[in-house]
Amino acid sequence: MLPSNTPSNPTVPGRFKGGRGKFAKKFQDFEDGGIALNDPSAGLEYQVWEGWIEDASRIYVQADNMSEPFLAYTGDGITEVSITFDQNMRLTVAFMEAGVGKLWWFDPTVPGMVIREFPGIRNPKVSLDDKRPIANASGTSDIILAYVREGNLYFCLQRERFAVEHLWLEGVNTLYRIGMTEGLRFQFEYR
C-alpha cells in the first residue's frame, strides 16, 4: 500500500529484495512468490519465480520446484513482461503486445482471468507491494501496476480494479522495475 498515494518524505532509497533484486530485462522478470501457483500456504516469499517471453509470442513462468514451465499467455508481438502474484498466488502479468500495454489478472467480479488494455503506455510493471503475512492478514497489500505515459510515471491499484490512474511523478523516460526494498519501502526505479 502506498500511504496517501504519495512518495515518502524524505525518500528512503534501498536495494530491492528477493526476486526484484535480480537483474531483469524487458523480456524477463523475477518476483518472489509461493510454493505453487494458486497455493499461498507457504507464504508469498517462499521462492523466486521467473517470467519470460519466448519467440515474441508466449509468456512462461517457472519456479525452481517446477519440472515444467507454465504457459501463461499466447499472443503476437510481445516485447516486455512483468510478473507478480496476488494474495492467493494467482499470477498477474503486465506486458506489451503489438505496442499496446496489457494486464492479465484475476478479476473477482467475473470471477476469472481477464485482460485489460492500457493504450499509450510504456514499460508496464507489476508487483504485490507487501508480501509479508501481516500485510495479507490485515488486507493492506495491493498489486501495483506502474507505467510511463507521455513522459510521466503513473500507477493503478488492484483494490481499484486497475481502473483509476494516479500520477506519481512527472518527467520520467523509462521505468525499469518496482517492488519492495530491503528497508520495507515500495520503490520505483526509473530514469
Image (spheres, rainbow, N blue to C red):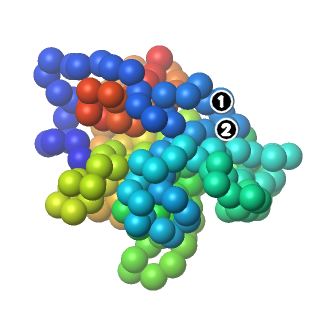
Residue type at mark 2?
A: Gln
- Is disc 2 in contact with disc 1, using a CB cutoff of under 8 Å? yes
Give the image location of residue 72, x and y in percent.
68, 62
Q: Image quadrant of residue 14?
A: top left
Residue drawn at point x = 14 percent, y = 42 percent: 4
Q: Residue at x 63, y 51 (%)?
A: 63
Q: Nearer the viewer, residue 161 or 37?
A: 37
- What kind of element bears circle 1? loop
Q: Position of residue 5 (x, y in %)?
A: 20, 41
Mark 1 highlights which residue?
Answer: 25
Q: Amino acid at mark 1?
A: Lys
**Left or right of residue 40: residue 74:** right
Residue 164, visible in the rendered structure: no
Find the distance from the CA under tag 2 to the CA under tag 1. 5 Å
**What crowding class fits label 1: few (fewer than 14 Cα within 10 Å), some (14-19), or many (20 or more)?**
some
Residue 1 visible in the current orientation: yes
Q: Which residue is mark 2?
A: 28
Above or below, 171 against 69 in this view is above
Q: Is residue 113 above or below residue 31?
A: below
Q: Residue at x 39, y 80 (%)?
A: 109
- Where residue 1 appears, x then y in whole percent? 24, 47
Categorize mark 2 by other alpha carbons within 10 Å: few (<14), some (14-19), many (20+): many
From what the image shows, is residue 121 above or below residue 7? below
